[in-house]
């Protein structure tokens, strides 16, 4: 019999994670990430802040419709209109949660809200009661709890639990707390609030001092049974507690923790890659769990020890978090069946037979250029195929780029744009620059390039380059991705992918930051 309590994993990659400057995601990208989180058995997925924009509303609604096995949550300030928008967006969810918040620290109440503590308490209670009309699953957060007066926190928490909040989340909004103090705060609240047994205590820690995971885990040791976290630690400013670090610490140190998560840890690395690819936020090589070097041993003494017995220097197994050690899986002669089977093993599904066929054609093209196809190649290839939506307005028809010592690099690009083919030539400071200039001379997008990054997907000079391009136009930010063994072609694909997102018709709206209230 299992005597351990459950630690609820609440993922906010799609909400707080998207608040990282530049990490905006389209509705379809959010659905892809949400499906991955569902497969990982994340308990609660916070999908967005519906009042912020129609894009946010659409994304939360789409996630609520796509996900069946995880609870889908939407964020609302403690205001009726905000809560009504979340209620509407979550109408079709199999399991819906409304998360409402109001600030409780003296500085936030006085300077931001210009409200007295009594007014804040009344508004919090009204908000929770209103949210309960939509669902029994209501979460309340006293924003900036980490800098709030403990007596006032006890008062407001007791009142919102009486009003029907079933989860009480304690945010360290500005990342100011340190582990022992934060753990003591949680223990204190649970002990002092008379009805604390009627709610799950949750924590939401920011990483301004690099302590988000440590603070969250200190809170778990003191009674918190939900942790709010994000893939790769994405989030506002320095980010939130990283899901992968939180989950793997609890799993690895079962000798210490009185609880366990239900997460399928073998999907951690695929989820990390998916989020990094979509947001363009690359993972640093020495990042715990998901960094490229997390399981690599450089020193001779370490290598010798690991060869003799893995446990000498490794506390986790790479395969338990989803590292496949660059396994060669398919090649030029592999057939459709092997391709389909391997994708299935990687948990990659297609919406239609057409999509599978298109991905298979791309696989064959890639296998012509590259001998050994690894799992990482398949993942990039499928993402790439997923990006080539039928209603895209711009398509790359042909590209020729030249660079030669002593000569100006130049590129000749043929594009299909709204049904018309155009060919142009441009020069630039390098072949990628020349390619982008050529494309832009046709599209005239008036966008600003905010980020250009290239990553080798696997090792070896025949590796595919995975390129991310971030564009901005009038406060609207998008990320584009492209992968190819030729990095100039990968760059062109990524640029065109970003342009398609920024110029696409309004019915496929994106999250537009800056058009509505911000958290
Ligand atoms: O950091 C924070 O306080 C938040 C709340 C909305 C929970 O993100
Ligand atoms: Zn936050």
Image: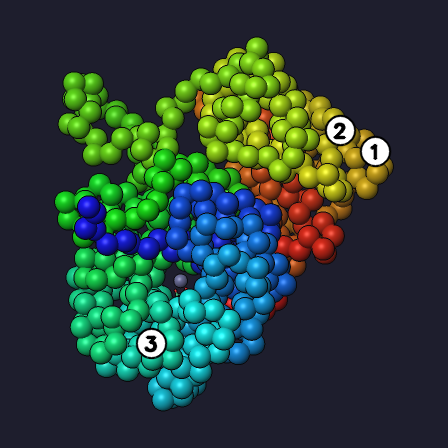
Specify the label residue 421 is tagged with: 1
- Left or right relative to 459: residue 422: right
Element at label 2 = strand
- Left or right relative to 413: residue 46: left
Element at label 1 = strand
Where is residue 298 shown, x and y percent of the image? 26, 24
Q: Is residue 518 above or below residue 305?
A: below
Specify the label residue 25 is tagged with: none
Residue 318 in sight from this viewpoint: yes
- Left or right relative to 234: residue 29: right
Residue 464 in sight from this viewpoint: no
The answer for how far apart the CA atoms under marks 2 and 1 are is 8 Å
Q: Residue at x 23, y 54 (%)?
A: 5
For the residues bearing labels 2 and 1, Cβ distance under 8 angstroms = yes
Residue identifier under label 2: 397
N-terminal label among 3 and 1: 3
């Amino acid at each position: 019999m299992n005597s351990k309590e459950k630690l609820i994993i609440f993922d906010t990659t799609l909400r707080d994670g998207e608040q990282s400057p530049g990490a905006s995601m389209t509705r379809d990208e959010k659905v892809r990430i949400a499906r991955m989180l569902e497969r990982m058995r994340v308990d609660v997925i916070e999908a967005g802040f519906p009042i912020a924009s129609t894009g946010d509303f659409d994304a939360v609604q789409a996630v609520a419709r796509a996900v069946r096995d995880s609870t889908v949550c939407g964020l609302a300030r403690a205001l009726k209109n905000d809560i009504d928008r979340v209620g509407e967006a979550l109408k079709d969810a199999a399991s819906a949660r409304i998360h409402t918040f109001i600030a409780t620290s003296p500085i936030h109440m006085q300077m931001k809200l210009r409200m007295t503590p009594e007014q804040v308490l009344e508004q919090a209670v009204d908000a929770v009661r209103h949210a309960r009309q939509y669902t029994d699953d209501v979460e309340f957060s006293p924003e900036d709890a980490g800098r709030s007066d403990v007596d006032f926190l006890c008062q407001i928490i007791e009142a919102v639990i009486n009003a029907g909040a079933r989860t009480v989340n304690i945010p360290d909004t500005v990342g100011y707390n340190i582990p022992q103090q934060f753990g003591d705060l949680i223990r204190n609240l649970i002990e002092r609030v008379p009805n604390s047994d009627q709610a799950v205590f949750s924590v939401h820690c920011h990483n301004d001092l690099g302590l988000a995971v440590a603070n969250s885990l200190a809170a778990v040791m003191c009674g918190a049974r939900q942790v709010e976290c994000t893939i790769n630690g994405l989030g506002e400013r320095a980010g939130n507690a990283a899901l992968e670090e939180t989950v793997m610490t609890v799993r690895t140190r079962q000798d210490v923790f009185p609880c366990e998560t239900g997460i399928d840890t073998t999907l951690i690395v695929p989820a990390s890659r998916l989020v990094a690819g979509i947001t363009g936020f690359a993972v640093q090589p020495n990042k715990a769990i998901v960094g490229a070097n997390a399981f690599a041993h450089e020193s001779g003494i370490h290598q010798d020890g690991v060869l003799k017995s893995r446990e000498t220097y490794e506390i986790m197994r790479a395969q338990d978090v989803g590292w496949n050690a660059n396994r060669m899986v398919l090649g030029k002669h592999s057939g459709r069946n092997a391709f389909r089977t391997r994708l299935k093993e990687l948990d990659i599904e297609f919406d239609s037979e057409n999509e599978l066929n298109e991905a298979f054609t791309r696989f064959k093209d890639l296998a012509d250029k590259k001998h050994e196809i690894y799992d990482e190649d398949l993942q990039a290839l499928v993402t790439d195929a997923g990006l080539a939506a039928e209603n895209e307005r711009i398509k790359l028809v042909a590209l020729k780029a030249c660079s030669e010592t002593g000569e100006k690099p130049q590129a000749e690009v043929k594009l299909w744009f709204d049904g018309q083919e155009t060919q142009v030539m441009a020069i630039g400071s390098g072949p990628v620059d020349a390619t982008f200039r050529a494309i832009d001379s046709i599209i005239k997008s008036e966008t600003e390039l905010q980020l250009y990054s290239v990553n080798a997907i696997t090792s070896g000079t025949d590796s595919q380059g995975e390129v991310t391009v971030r564009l901005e136009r009038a406060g609207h930010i998008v990320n584009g991705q492209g992968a190819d063994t030729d990095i100039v072609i990968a760059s062109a694909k990524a640029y065109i992918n970003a342009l398609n997102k920024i110029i696409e018709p309004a019915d496929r709206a994106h999250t537009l930051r800056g058009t509505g209230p911000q958290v």
